[in-house]
Image (tube, grey):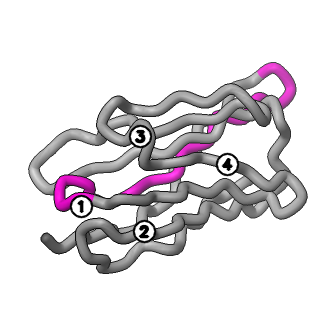
Amino acid sequence: QVQLVESGGGLVQSGGSLRLSCATSGRIFSSDMMAWYRQAPGKQREFVARLIGSGSMAYADSVKGRFTISRDNAKNTVYLQMNSLKAEDTAVYFCYAGLLRGGTLNILWGQGTQVTVSS
């Protein structure tokens, strides 16, 4: 059973940067979809970014141009580089994996990492 563990969250000032990591306990393949979601207090979880393979990326409009998703298959790790952070980026960030194994799509979530941006 593959598990996801996020790290890299913390407290940062507005305009600063953080890099989140999502380490998987098992192997991930280029065909697996990896994504980041976030949930702010009192709000629903929302999509942030997703990556399939090495070049198919998508971002929420609110983070486009500031956040970058990437992966290192050798390290079984997905990253979210967050630049020019704003107070409204404050949320718990969750790693998501859509793993296709033997014809079955397995959906996994990490436990989340807190990102707090002070204005």
Residue shown at 27%/50% (left/top)? 39
The label shown at residue 17 is 2
Instruction: Measure the C-alpha gap from mark 3 to mark 4.
Output: 13 Å
Specify whether residue 40 is painted magenta.
no
Instruction: Measure the C-alpha gap from mark 3 to mark 2.
Output: 16 Å
Q: Nearer the viewer, residue 116 or 40?
A: 116
- For disc 2, the neighbor class at 10 Å (few under 14, some 14 to 19, many from 20) is some
Q: Is residue 89 left or right of residue 5?
A: left
Furthest-right residue in this view: 74
- For disc 1, the neighbor class at 10 Å (few under 14, some 14 to 19, many from 20) is many
Residue shown at 83%/63% (left/top)? 75
Mark 3 element type? strand
Residue 82 percent coordinates (x, y)? 45, 58
Residue 53 percent coordinates (x, y)? 78, 32
Residue shown at 49%/46% (left/top)? 36
Q: Which residue bears the numbered disc 4?
A: 70
Residue 84 percent coordinates (x, y)? 35, 59
The C terminus sits in image quarter: bottom left
